[in-house]
Image (cartoon, rainbow, N blue to C red):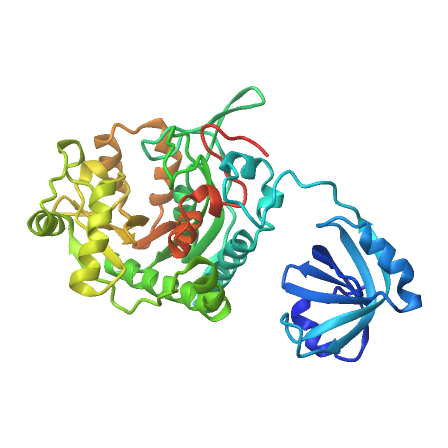
Amino acid sequence: MKKIYVEELNDYIDKEITFQGFVDTIRDKKWVQFVILRDSSGKVQLTIEKSEEQNKEMVELISNLTRESVIKVVGKVVKNEAVKLGGMEIIPSSIEVLSEAQELPFDFNNLEGVNLDTRLDYRFLDIRNDKNFLIRLVESKMLEGMREYLYKNKYKEIHTPKLIGAASESGSEVFEVKYFDRKAYLAQSPQFYKQMAIASGLDKVFEVAPAFRAENSNTNRHATEFTSLDIEFAYIDSYEDVMDMEEDLLIAGLTKVKEAYGKEIEELFGKEVIIPKKPFPRMKLEDLLNALNKEYGFELPKEDVGDMNAEAEKLTYKYAMEHFNSEFMFITDYAKTKRPFYHLRKNGIPQGYDLIWRGTEITSGSQREHRYNELVSNAKEKGLGEDVKFYLEFFKYGMPPHGGFAIGVDRLTMLLLGVPSVKETQFIFRGPNRLAP
């Protein structure tokens, strides 16, 4: 049987249908029972007149039914302008309980005072909250818009391994796992494999997949496992091409979200989905830090010289809004000591960038070094040997100029909705102290 959703009910006015959903609310009045049913697309009212003899069995069933039970209703969809939920209701002829809910551990419609860890323990209930459910819809819609853009522009979706034989390229810790008679590691990113795809002739690729970071970070924007949207494409002239492409991708995703859920986001989160205009402002790191010092008296700590820190990111957002009326800003010209060895360099300067949105870094991107000898030299400089030996093989037999970036999907959603932490935007959060559910 095809499931009929709330959003489709206008197509069934004055028709008898079978409808299934969660029991959201029961209002048992003297002469009538109102039951609000919920599915993934919305809510609808079920109305049962107590005075009608044929309803006696249904009235008794509803009188003893618990909230969040799942029921199947056979009934007629009728127009009723007095009903606030879509101006319609279902008049049932029969009701079947498919799954009876036990007493809830907390009221997910009122999460004030409910400990976040408790909510995460019962994440399947927590998501039933209207705001949390919308988070899931928004993230899905944003990725839908981005995927549409990528497919339209001839990108191919790839799927890279998450079990790898050597620790990956960055300085972050990796998770070690037992792999039969030897060690393996969980991949921190698909970076090397994206570039392998470029070497194979797949000149435009992307992946949406988990990434793993064994960092004992307990901030609002870090997780030990997160979803990453990774892009790589060939035949570029400079990292400016990569920034241009990312602008288009973000505009596509945000536009899709605004069209589908802009009003709901404003109602539930008090946030407007702002579609940015091209080009996003771009500043060299040194120029930006000088500006932040002049405007706000900001001094970058010595340990962060050549890079950014969280305070600098927040001030960058303020500066971008005040001087460019932009929520986004690209920062370029980082120190080579702070960037991966595979970033192409010109005059010793890595040809890469970070993208700051609403005070937080959402992307690191670059033009990659595609020349074998230079790449080998960069790897030696960083003290990398056997761990990148297999990677260097990709560059021996012809490699086009290319570049790319990665976006943390959960962090992007957090910033879009103004949610305090990725713990609330990830479907299931993984952090240093959480490995369940």
Query: Residue 150: in sight, yes or no?
Result: no
In the rendered image, the residue lying farthest to the right is: 53
* In the foreground, 201 or 285: 285
Quarter of the rendering occupied by the N terminus: bottom right
Q: Is residue 369 left or right of residue 324?
A: right
Give the residue at x 47% y 60%. Answer: 142
Quarter of the rendering occupied by the C terminus: top right
Total marks drawn?
0
Within the image, what quadrant is residue 85 found in?
bottom right
Q: Whole-percent x and y of residue 257?
A: 46, 65
* In the foreground, 223 or 132: 132
Give the residue at x 25% y 27%. Answer: 383
In the rendered image, the residue lying farthest to the front is: 30
Q: Whole-percent x and y of residue 372?
A: 28, 43
Query: Residue 426: in sight, yes or no?
Result: yes
Give the residue at x 38% y 64%. Answer: 272
* In the foreground, 393 or 355: 355
Q: Is residue 194 left or right of residue 365?
A: right
Q: Is residue 73 left or right of residue 255?
A: right
Q: Whole-percent x and y of residue 432?
A: 45, 29
Give the residue at x 44% y 48%. Answer: 410
Q: Is residue 180 left or right of residue 71?
A: left
* In the foreground, 32 or 254: 32
Q: Whole-percent x and y of residue 228?
A: 44, 47
Within the image, what quadrant is residue 59 found in?
bottom right
